[in-house]
Image: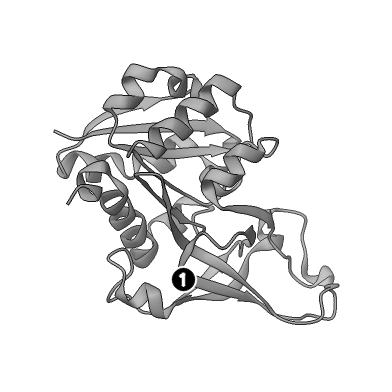
Amino acid sequence: MPKALVVRGGWEGHRPVEATDLFLPFLADNNFDVHVSASTDVYGDARLMAETDLIVQCVTMSAVERDELDGLRAAVAAGTGFTGWHGGIADSFRASSDYLQLVGGQFATHPGKEPGARCGDETDNFLPHTVEITPIGREHPVTAGLDDFDLTTEQYWVLHDDLIDVLATTTHPVQPWHPWHRPITSPAVWTRQWGEGRIVVTTPGHSLDVLRHPTVRTVIERGMLWASRTASAS
């Protein structure tokens, strides 16, 4: 039976408990033995990490200790899969450059509405946008057969490197109230090979309704299966 470790915590605005609870039945239905941790100190448990086939992380911002990060990096390099969504993986441990290198992409911002349309709550950053499957994505097991899809939620602007395989993108347009001068395309879904391990990052997922979106949920669930050590060995 493959072992999955769900690590959740950090900023409560992303509702890490409720968000990860959405996927626990899926993991159980796919025969994972699931362990849930409310702290990243579990990453420092070398024995547990060596036995873990998949890590699902939902920890926005927060901080990670050196031994914990070393444990996470070592486990992924040895074949443990690593996946998550939105700020729970792409905006974690901002002060750790080694974590950013592991994941390959970092949240920079989510552009907002026209200033006169803002009301002072999180919806100020909810923009209608399209997530487009790339040519690579149309062939990849995580996104094959899926169509481009539209969302109205936070649209992540991501800083990234060239070691990622981008399965889907989203483009930030030029608007009069923004300082950039040409459209910016950010990865919205990507994979990364790190040693023997597979990483999958899905940037949509700010709120529970987005996580319940059929395509977003499909991408996240396929990503869990593809990233796991069991899949990597096949």
Q: Give the image location of residue 219, x and y in percent.
A: 35, 61
The part of the image, by quadrant, that contains residue 32 is top left
Q: Is residue 6 above or below residue 112?
A: above
* Residue at point 70%, 35% (across, down): 95
Going by the numbered disc 1, the residue's amino acid type is Ala
Judge by depth and name the residue closer to the eye, 210 or 68.
68
Residue 107 visible at all? yes
- Element at label 1: strand
Q: Give the image location of residue 167, x and y in percent.
A: 43, 69
Q: Give the image location of residue 159, x and y in percent.
A: 66, 59
Judge by depth and name the residue closer to the eye, 165 or 216.
165
* Residue at point 66%, 40% (across, down): 97
> In this image, 35 relative to 104: left or right?
left
Q: Is residue 144 above or below residue 194?
A: below
* Residue at point 53%, 52% (across, down): 86
> In this image, 11 relative to 53: left or right?
right
Q: Crowdedness of circle 1 by 10 Å Cα count: few (<14), some, many (20+)?
A: many
Q: How does the figure colour the protein chain or chains?
A: one colour
Placement of the N terminus among the 4 image quadrants: top left
* Residue at point 83%, 73% (across, down): 178
- Residue indicated by mark 1: 168
Q: Is residue 175 above or below residue 208?
A: below
Q: Is residue 134 above or below residue 62?
A: below
Residue 92 visible at all? no
> In this image, 2 relative to 181: left or right?
left
> In this image, 7 relative to 156: left or right?
left
The part of the image, by quadrant, that contains residue 35 is top left
How many numbered marks are there? 1
